[in-house]
Image (tube, grey):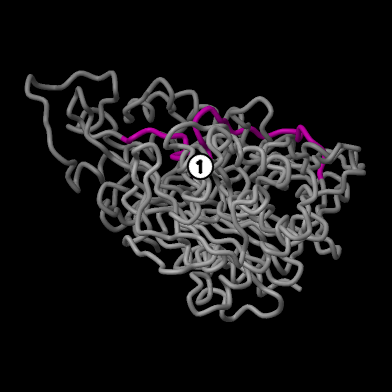
């Protein structure tokens, strides 16, 4: 038997399996009165002296035991009183049986790690004569009450279920939306179980296209979204509805590679698109649940933005791929200094070699002759030719990148992907695809014929500009001095790439960015606090490109 106490609910009457290591062989429902621990957020200290300092092992064990026992007993008030936020905890705990219709549950605590106590839940959900087992794991943390000094469970919705967040609730009943069977471009069925990063996307596709595709509703347990227009998240299916078939542009093989690649680093995400069509081939995040950085992040992209800056420089006659530029160790813009990494300089670079080495000053100094137009030149380039900020209609929600007008030193920062510039991996994969294809094709995940939505458009890049961008990307991924060469070494075919690192306020280590292409697949990755682009994000992109055509 695993360590801990099993607290069981049987048809609304809770029994206890005792004898777990660390808790002793006694009924955990005994002694729920005053024993020197507990006393919720509104309780008063038992003496004039409020205890301080870290919670002890005994306090952690006793408080977690009493909380889980009260929860299992169905006594939401007592359980909530053992937390530091009774007002929020009590209705959420009560809803576990009333709204989620959990009729049986066995909660098994595991060994504590510091103040954290993990536990598994083996439950049964019953609704209108239909029942199904439901298993999951979660954890709680015991803290010392700020006013009482008592040990208390640090309340968060995730105590009830790990995927439950603020403003969300559990519910069981007839589903609000029709079921779907989402398939990739080759007809392979896509599920959250096989491709965890697609959970939110599949729920969104279901809400938007389930009824259109001919699906019917079933009986499920789900998380009600905190957002009025956000998709609910299905946790358990008691009775399946008839699924409507929804075709997507995803590629199961590339998606599987993306899911595996992001697991290399915490807080990493990757997106892949097909340059010749704009079709989204993969979107993956680590962690797989929660915020989807691959399509929703809005952060500085660092030097990967030099793809757009290079296009702007070329189109404004300020330079060319093989033309000379200056790469001093630093340059000032309206009195503000900008430096290269480790203050390196290059004696006689071209724009192509400066791009390959990611020389910051070479992408700031040439822009100075634009004068007042410098504040908007990048804005116009990004929108008119790369489709940034043009209200993409991908079939799912996306954050479509932002290159706002700037002034002062922020203008110089924007040319190297800092300042007010905001991107995510899907945006950067699209920018790379545009450079390779020669024109912007809006990324999409379901055919527009499914709902007759209108795709965003942009002007084609002049042919010589696209050719020079491809030349620069290829050089960066194949030449010995290119910052992307090591990461792209194992990628075959026609290939190119650009590295980036972005300084984010409050982070000790910069974000790692990398974008590249191989044949007819472009991909971009972000690893938050990952450091240099080639070290973290680079291997993620390379793995995804290797799965492509």
Quadrant of the image containing the N terminus: bottom left
Tell which of 15 and 61 is nearer to you: 61
* 202 is within the stretch colored magenta: no
Asked if 145 appears above or below 9 in the picture, the reply is: above
Quarter the C terminus occupies = bottom right
Q: Position of residue 324 (x, y in %)?
A: 53, 64
Query: In the depicted view, which residue is nearer to us: 339 or 204?
Result: 339
Residue 31 position within the rendered picture, expressed as x and y whole percent measured from the top left: 26, 35
Left-right relation of 86 to 456: left
Give the residue displayed 77% in from the left and 44% down from the top.
394
Q: Residue furthest left?
A: 49
Indicate the position of residue 515 as horizontal and vertical percent values. 59, 61
> What secondary structure is the stretch in magenta mostly built from?
loop
Asked which secondary structure carries label 1, the reply is: loop
Observer-nearest of 250 and 135: 250
Residue lying at 82% horizontally and 53% vertically, measured from the top left? 248
Q: Which residues are magenta?
A: 153-179
Q: Residue 119 vs residue 214: left or right? A: left
The residue lying at 17 percent from left, 32 percent from top is 36
Residue 300, horizontal then vertical, whole percent: 49, 45
Which residue position is annotated with label 1? Answer: 161
* Mark 1 surroundings: few (<14), some (14-19) or many (≥20) residues within 10 A: some
């Amino acid at each position: 038997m695993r360590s801990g106490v099993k607290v069981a609910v049987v048809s609304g009457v809770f029994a206890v399996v005792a004898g777990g290591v660390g808790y002793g062989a006694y009924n955990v429902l005994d002694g729920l009165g005053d024993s020197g621990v507990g006393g919720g957020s509104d309780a008063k200290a038992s003496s004039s002296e409020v205890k301080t300092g870290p919670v002890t092992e005994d306090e952690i064990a006793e408080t977690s035991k009493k909380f889980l026992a009260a929860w299992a007993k169905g006594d939401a008030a007592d359980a909530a009183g053992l937390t530091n936020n009774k007002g929020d905890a009590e209705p959420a705990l009560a809803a576990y049986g009333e709204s989620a219709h959990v009729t049986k549950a066995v909660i098994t605590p595991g060994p504590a790690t510091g103040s954290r106590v993990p536990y598994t839940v083996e439950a049964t959900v019953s609704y209108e004569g239909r029942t199904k087992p439901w298993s999951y794991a979660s954890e709680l943390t015991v803290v010392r009450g700020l006013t009482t000094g008592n040990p208390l469970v640090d309340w968060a919705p995730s105590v009830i279920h790990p995927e439950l967040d603020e403003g969300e609730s559990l519910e069981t009943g007839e589903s609000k939306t029709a079921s779907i069977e989402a398939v990739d471009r080759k007809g392979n069925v896509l599920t959250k179980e096989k491709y965890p990063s697609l959970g939110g996307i599949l729920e969104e596709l279901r809400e938007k296209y389930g009824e259109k595709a001919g699906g019917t509703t079933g009986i499920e347990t789900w998380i009600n979204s905190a957002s009025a227009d956000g998709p609910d998240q299905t946790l358990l299916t008691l009775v399946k509805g008839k699924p409507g078939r929804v075709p997507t542009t995803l590629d199961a093989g590339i998606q599987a590679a993306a899911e595996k690649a992001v697991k290399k680093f915490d807080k990493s995400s990757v997106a892949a698109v097909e340059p010749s069509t704009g079709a989204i081939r993969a979107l993956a995040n680590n962690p797989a649940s929660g915020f989807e950085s691959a399509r929703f992040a809005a952060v500085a992209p660092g030097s990967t933005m030099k793809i757009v800056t290079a296009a702007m420089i070329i189109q404004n006659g300020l330079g060319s791929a093989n033309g000379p530029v200056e790469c001093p160790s630093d340059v000032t813009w309206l009195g503000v200094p900008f430096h290269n990494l480790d203050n390196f300089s290059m004696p006689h670079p071209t724009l192509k070699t400066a791009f390959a080495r990611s020389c910051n000053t070479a992408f700031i100094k040439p822009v100075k002759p634009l004068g007042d137009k410098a504040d908007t030149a990048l804005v116009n380039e990004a929108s008119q030719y790369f489709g940034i900020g043009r209200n993409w209609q991908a079939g799912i929600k996306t954050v479509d990148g932002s290159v706002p007008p700037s002034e002062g030193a922020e203008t110089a920062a924007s040319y190297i992907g800092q300042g007010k510039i905001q991107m995510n991996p899907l945006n950067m994969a699209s920018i790379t695809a545009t450079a390779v294809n020669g024109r912007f094709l809006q990324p999409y995940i379901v055919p527009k014929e499914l709902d007759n939505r209108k795709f965003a458009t942009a002007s084609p890049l002049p042919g010589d500009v696209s050719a020079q961008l491809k030349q620069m990307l290829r050089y960066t991924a194949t030449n010995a001095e290119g910052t992307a060469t090591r990461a792209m070494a194992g990628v075959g075919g026609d290939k190119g790439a650009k590295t980036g690192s972005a300084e984010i306020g409050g982070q000790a280590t910069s974000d790692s960015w990398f974008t590249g292409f191989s044949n007819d697949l472009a991909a971009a990755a972000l690893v938050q606090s990952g450091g240099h682009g080639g070290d973290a994000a680079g291997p993620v992109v390379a793995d995804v490109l290797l799965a492509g055509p």
